[in-house]
Image: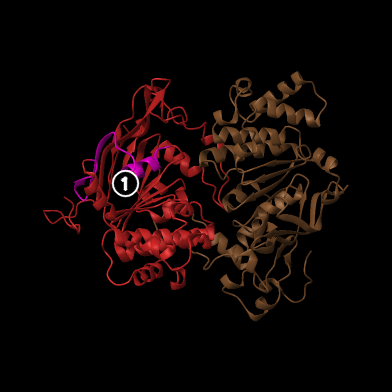
């Protein structure tokens, strides 16, 4: 059973994490030929563990195909987990029935990259932002009042209520998506490349809005992005994902200021910084291999600038350091 | 001989749409010297891509047409050239690299065939010689198993590899000018870094580069000079240091401040520019940036500001740059 309101403290009075993910796996079977013979699995998410506390933002960075979007979708049960556990406020998400899961959805909302395709073009803004409220029977008073209040929170005027998604610019549409996500008073919002399609000047506005809403609503975010710079400006903690695995996780300032995993270093060094030192391209080699056939040993070894002989055979050990920092690399094992 | 390779003079491009007519590019002038890399930056819809397409007359028409101006390239006005003469320039003297290689490559033909076709259109070369020439270029841009890749279809290759092929095709005929429109935007940062160094290495043969991007970091990596566009107009231009160290136009200053940098000190608010870009169908009278500018004055609401020169090669279209004693630059 899911309680209507979530207890913000555990049984013993101490705060437990809002979300706890343990050894999560999402594999997609590859089928070939006439009889759909199994030809292995694409291991999109392959043994991922992390926690998100209340009022905290975990930034999840990685390049395209690393599994970060699949991870977000698995948390929402839009993909089925192949193994592992997801505990949301102590409740196991994969073992929930459909009706129970639908009730839990109120607490976990999502904002996607492209608001134009995630907003129904045939619904006006009022219907979009209050649809969830109606669905969950949370409407008191008029829909119009609710909509106006939500739009005000995201910096849009009352005049937006009766307009349609296509009438807005990209930044305004993303504000509408945020208002919709906010409407159900969620605890966790999964932002999947939520600001990636926006122009710089508007992107900064939306990041600031997300930060403001986090303070006023005690929200937690899972902020998924390929952009390390953006993540470093919004996240309390950062997880770096490569080929289905989290290779490093820790406080944002520690990860950005002192990256330990060679992949994290490469990822940070490859960001062009206006006014900074020009990038030395020789630090990065090749492209990420397919998650259908990840390399033996450490998955990063074919591209790693610090590769050693045993990296090619043995999977790297998980090293836990102070301040909740974890790194998965032979350099520290 | 003149050192200027490309000289765009007072170019205006007009679009006639169902909602109304507007200038996507409004009276802009810019030049590129031989061997120089110029970054054209601005946000989506500011007219930077339309400018790039106008140079080689690739504006889709209708709805667009070049209203006025000149594009002087090696002493010819490209806007008045016969189509056959223009075809000989496109792809050879001026080549283009687009953001999405998979839409620029033909999905129906193998890589080798596409490359050979381009080579033999511009050069007298046997099929065998063109094949070898193309294959060698694939190796030069860092593609392993080049011979094998010549037989591949674009969909069989990753985005990074497709972009390498686009770069090979853009450079293989020794162009004088390469126009690159957001060449790394669709790529991962690690691949982007590889593409940067590739374009830098390849430019050693003195080609000029017009790089169109929304990313100031990319400009810093690749360019000698910067031209900033906002709402169909050029608002500031200058050398790399003029723009990054001493920007004058409030939009340039705001844009630089709004870029999220690697925050070592943890999370925090960014300096955003308030408001949004006006619709090209409803540009205000006077300066297009007036609604978002903190220095707005009566004068800004009246006149579209001219580009005032701040020092040699650095100018801003803002009354703040008007010292009163200097004449407007170009």
Q: As drawn, which residue projects farthest toward the front? A: A122
Residue behind mark 1? A76
Count numbered badges in the picture.
1
Image spot of residue B119 (x, y percent): 76, 29
| Residues shaded magenta | A66-94
Image spot of residue B192 (x, y percent): 56, 41
Subunit ID for the residue under disc 1: A
**Picture layout, residue A296 above or below residue A17:** above
Q: Is residue A72 left or right of residue B148?
A: left
- State the SS at label 1: loop
Image spot of residue B324 (x, y percent): 75, 77
**Between A230 and B187, the one nearer to me in the picture:** B187
Q: Colour of chain B?
A: brown
**Between B200 and A4, the one nearer to me in the picture:** A4
Q: As drawn, which residue projects farthest toward the top? A: B128
Image spot of residue B172 (x, y percent): 72, 32
Q: Colour of chain A?
A: red
The image quadrant of residue B163 is top right
**Picture layout, residue B129 above or below residue B277:** above
Q: Residue at x 55, y 50 (%)?
A: A276
Q: Residue at x 69, y 29 (%)?
A: B114
């Amino acid at each position: 059973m899911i309680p209507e309101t979530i207890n913000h403290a555990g049984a013993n009075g101490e705060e437990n994490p809002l979300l706890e993910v343990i050894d999560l796996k999402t594999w997609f079977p590859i089928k070939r030929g006439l009889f759909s013979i199994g030809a292995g699995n694409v291991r999109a998410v392959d043994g991922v563990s992390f926690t998100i506390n209340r009022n905290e933002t975990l930034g999840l960075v990685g390049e395209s195909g690393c599994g970060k979007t699949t991870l977000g979708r698995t948390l929402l049960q839009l993909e089925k987990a192949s193994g592992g556990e997801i505990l949301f406020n102590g409740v196991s998400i994969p073992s929930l029935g459909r009706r129970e899961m639908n009730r839990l959805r109120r607490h976990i909302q999502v904002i996607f990259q492209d608001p134009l395709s995630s907003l129904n073009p045939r619904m006006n803004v009022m219907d979009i932002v209050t649809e969830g409220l109606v669905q969950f029977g949370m409407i008191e008073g008029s829909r119009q009042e609710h909509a106006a209040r939500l739009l005000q929170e995201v910096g849009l005027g009352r005049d937006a209520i009766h307009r349609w998604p296509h009438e807005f610019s990209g930044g305004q549409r993303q504000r509408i998506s945020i208002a919709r996500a906010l409407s159900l008073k969620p605890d966790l919002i999964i932002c999947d490349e939520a600001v990636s399609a926006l122009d710089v000047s508007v992107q900064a506005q939306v990041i600031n809005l997300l930060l403001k809403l986090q303070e006023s609503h005690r929200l937690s975010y899972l902020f998924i992005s390929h952009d390390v710079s953006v993540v470093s400006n919004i996240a309390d903690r950062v997880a770096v994902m490569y080929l289905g695995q989290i290779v490093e996780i820790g406080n944002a300032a520690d990860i950005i200021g002192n990256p330990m995993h060679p992949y994290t270093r490469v990822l940070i060094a490859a960001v062009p910084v206006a006014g900074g030192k020009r990038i030395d391209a020789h630090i990065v080699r090749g492209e990420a291999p397919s998650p259908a056939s990840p390399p033996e040993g450490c998955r990063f070894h074919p591209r790693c600038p610090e590769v050693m002989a045993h990296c090619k055979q043995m999977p790297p050990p998980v090293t836990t350091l102070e301040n909740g920092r974890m790194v998965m690399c032979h350099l520290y094992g | 001989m003149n050192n200027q390779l490309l000289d765009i003079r007072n170019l205006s491009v007009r679009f006639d749409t169902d909602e109304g007519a507007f200038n996507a590019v409004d009276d802009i002038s810019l030049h590129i010297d031989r061997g120089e890399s110029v970054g054209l930056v601005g946000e989506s819809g500011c007219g930077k891509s339309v400018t790039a397409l106008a140079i080689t007359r690739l504006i889709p028409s209708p709805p667009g047409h070049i209203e006025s101006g000149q594009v002087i390239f090696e002493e010819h006005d490209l806007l008045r050239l016969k189509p056959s003469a223009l075809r000989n320039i496109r792809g050879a003297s001026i080549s283009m690299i687009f953001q999405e290689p998979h839409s620029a490559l033909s999905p129906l033909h193998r890589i080798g065939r596409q490359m050979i076709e381009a080579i033999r259109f511009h050069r007298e070369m046997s099929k065998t010689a063109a094949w070898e020439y193309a294959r060698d270029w694939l190796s030069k841009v860092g593609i392993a198993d080049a011979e094998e890749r010549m037989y591949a279809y674009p969909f069989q290759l990753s985005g990074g590899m497709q972009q390498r092929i686009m770069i090979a095709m853009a450079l293989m005929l020794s162009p004088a000018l390469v126009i690159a429109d957001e060449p790394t935007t669709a790529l991962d940062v690690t691949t982007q870094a590889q593409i940067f160094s590739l374009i830098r290495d390849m430019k050693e043969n003195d080609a000029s580069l017009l790089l169109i991007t929304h990313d100031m970091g990319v400009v810093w990596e690749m360019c000698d000079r910067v031209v900033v566009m906002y709402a169909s107009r050029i608002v500031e231009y200058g050398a790399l240091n003029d723009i990054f160290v001493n920007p004058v136009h409030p939009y340039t200053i705001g844009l630089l401040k709004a870029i999220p940098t690697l925050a070592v000190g943890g999370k925090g608010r960014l300096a955003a520019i308030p408001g949004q870009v006006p619709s090209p169908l409803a540009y205000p009278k006077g300066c297009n940036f007036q609604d978002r500018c903190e220095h707005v004055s009566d004068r800004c609401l009246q006149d579209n500001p001219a580009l005032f020169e701040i020092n040699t090669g650095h100018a801003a279209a803002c009354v703040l740059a008007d010292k009163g004693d200097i004449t407007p630059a170009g």
